[in-house]
Image (tube, rainbow, N blue to C red):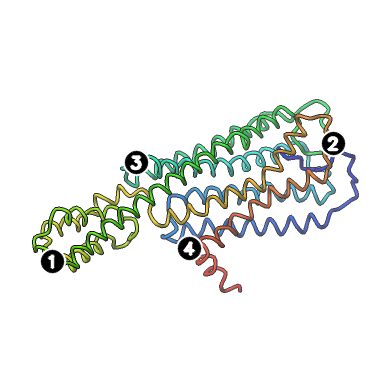
Amino acid sequence: MNNVSGNETEPDPLGHDFPALILGTFLILLITAGNLLVCLSVWTEKQLRTTTNFFIVSLAASDLLLAVLVLPLYVYSEFQGGVWTLGPGLCDYLMTMDVMLCTASIFNLCSISVDRFIAVLIPLNYNRKHVDLRQIVLISMTWILAFAVASPIVFGLNNVPGRDQTVCQLEDDNYIIYSSVCSFFLPCPIMLLLYCGMFRGLRRWEEARKRKLRHNLHGFKKINGDPAEPQSPPPLIERSSTHVKREELHLFPKSDCDLSRQFVDRSIQTVTFSEVKYVQSCPANRRKRAKINGRERKAMKVLPIVVGAFLFCWTPFFVVHITRATCKSCRIPPHLLSIVTWLGYVNSAVNPIIYTIFNMEFRNFFRKVMHPCC
């Protein structure tokens, strides 16, 4: 997938690219620190342990492994002026990890889109054990499929006759096309369609919930504000108190049903003991049916930005490399290959910055950890 040398002409063996070394070292440190903080935040902070954030941890793990296992070798090669001096075996390892981790990143985003699409558009009646199982299956399949895409390199795809061992790159143009389609051009449209469907469904669900809430609260105010109203509540009141609870269960994650019970006790003095008991007992039954809670909705709002940043950083890389593989007459400047490769790697440092800017809970954790240093 990646042409480490970034040059198609004979490189200068004595040239050293110090700007590449400085940029690469800074990028490695930034990616490692940022994604490590993401993993630690979800591990240590209970409020960050949401369904979406478990997938974000898997995405951060792929970026973290990229910084540790791929970037040092890539930066070393760039520092050497694009000359590969570490032998074909280590080159094949680099190509395998590069393809696998890049593929794992986009497959993680696809897994998030599948999980959120199910959570929003399919009526849920599951408990948390079922959700955890689905997460495990999706995350496991993400890494298994990513390795499957990269595995041909492990089995000797790059061992072609007359191979130039001073250049580390994928040698088979057909494999470049295959890996680009499997890693990017096929999952990206599927992911975007799922996200569009998910947010349309989420918007319809929110609008319906707000309409029903306004209707129920209007019913409460109308009953409480009319002194001529009979002391015995009509069936509408019983139905309203129940419906307010059902629709607002996810708005009060800590004491939602207690709050509903207190509201009924203060405002409607004629509610029977059995009705109050029913409202009190709702968490055991209704919490299973809540589609998504408030923290998951906050995490979901960050996802379009994460996906947009990924597409911005990686689309030029895949377009350039699939063009190089399919168009032999096309002259692609070596500097362009290098630029799109660096841009793709920069994406691994962008995601933690996005979480810090757009998610208050991540931002508070990062501030708490970095406060002694700042």
- Give the residue at x 54% y 43%: 108
Near mark 3 (Cα within 10 A), the count class, few <14, some 14-19 or many ≥20, is few
Tag nearer the camera, 1 or 3: 1
Where on the picture, by quarter, is residue 214?
bottom left
Labelled pair 2, 3 in contact (Cβ < 8 Å): no
Q: Earlier in the sequence, mark 4 or mark 1?
A: 1
Kind of residue indicated by mark 4: Glu
> Percent x, y for residue 227?
14, 69
- Kindly indicate the quadrant of the structure image that contains residue 294: bottom left
Q: Is residue 132 toward the left or the right of residue 278 in the image? A: right
Mark 1: which secondary structure?
Answer: loop
Which residue type carries mark 1? Gln
Q: Distance between the residues labelled 4 and 3?
A: 28 Å
Q: What element carries label 2?
A: loop
N-term mark: 4 or 2: 2
Residue type at tag 2: Arg
Check disc 3 and report its element: helix, strand or loop: loop
- Foreground: disc 1 or disc 2: 1
Query: Mark 1 — residue?
Result: 269
Q: Name the residue under label 3.
A: 123
Identify the residue position indicated by label 4 in the image. Answer: 361
Residue in the picture at 46% in, 44% down = 198
Q: Name the N-terminal-most of marks 1 and 2.
A: 1
Residue located beneath label 2 in the image: 331
